[in-house]
Amino acid sequence: METKENTTIITEELLQLVSFKIGEAEFGVDILRVQEINKMMELTTVPNTPHFVEGVVNLRGRIIPVINLRSRLGLELKEYDSETRIIVVELIDKTIGFIVDEVKEVLRIPKSITEAPPEIVSGVDSDYITAIGKLEDRLLILLDLTKILSNEEQKELV
């Protein structure tokens, strides 16, 4: 007679992320928020928008604001190149594009390899950093894009 071992399978929560670079830093965002990733395209500037809004783009009949993530994170601006991408995300009730230096890959990482950001980076301006992922050969800064813009800033967008 055959007996089955009583085994319990522990399923660890996996985070599915799109990773991208801004300068030397690598960031990750929840893949479920990402609608699409596009090459850099011509932007139309809009007067009286916040400094980090590069302009708007017509994406299949929808006008969406495009934010320079370098500018929003307080990093030095650089020229766009062949690796520059616009990550289009759905935030609450708005579709927004974020300009990044380079999209790297789609990652599935166990939640257990992440930890809260150190206190030195968890100030008021960095509430959008949710965790730091410790990968084998690098660190990944996890961003909560819903917190990148304050409610007031979201209202200011086109």
Image (cartoon, rainbow, N blue to C red):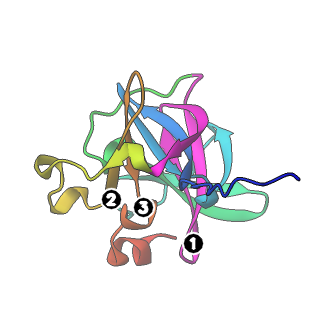
Residue 103: say if magenta.
yes
Q: Earlier in the sequence, mark 3 or mark 1?
A: 3
x and y percent of residue 24 in the render? Answer: 35, 25
| Residue range (magenta) | 82-111
Q: Decide: is 117 above or below 103.
A: below
Residue holding disc 3: 47
Q: Report the front residue among 124 and 17.
A: 17
Q: Are marks 3 and 1 in contact (CB under 8 Å)?
A: no
Crowdedness near tag 2: few (<14), some (14–19) or many (≥20) residues, C-alpha within 10 Å = some
Q: Are marks 3 and 2 in contact (CB under 8 Å)?
A: no
- Asked if residue 37 can be seen in this view, the reply is yes
Residue 128's disc is 2
Q: Decide: is 49 above or below 80.
A: below
Q: Earlier in the sequence, mark 1 or mark 2?
A: 1
Residue holding disc 1: 94
Amino acid on which the number 3 mark rests in the picture: Pro
x and y percent of residue 118 in the render? Answer: 17, 47
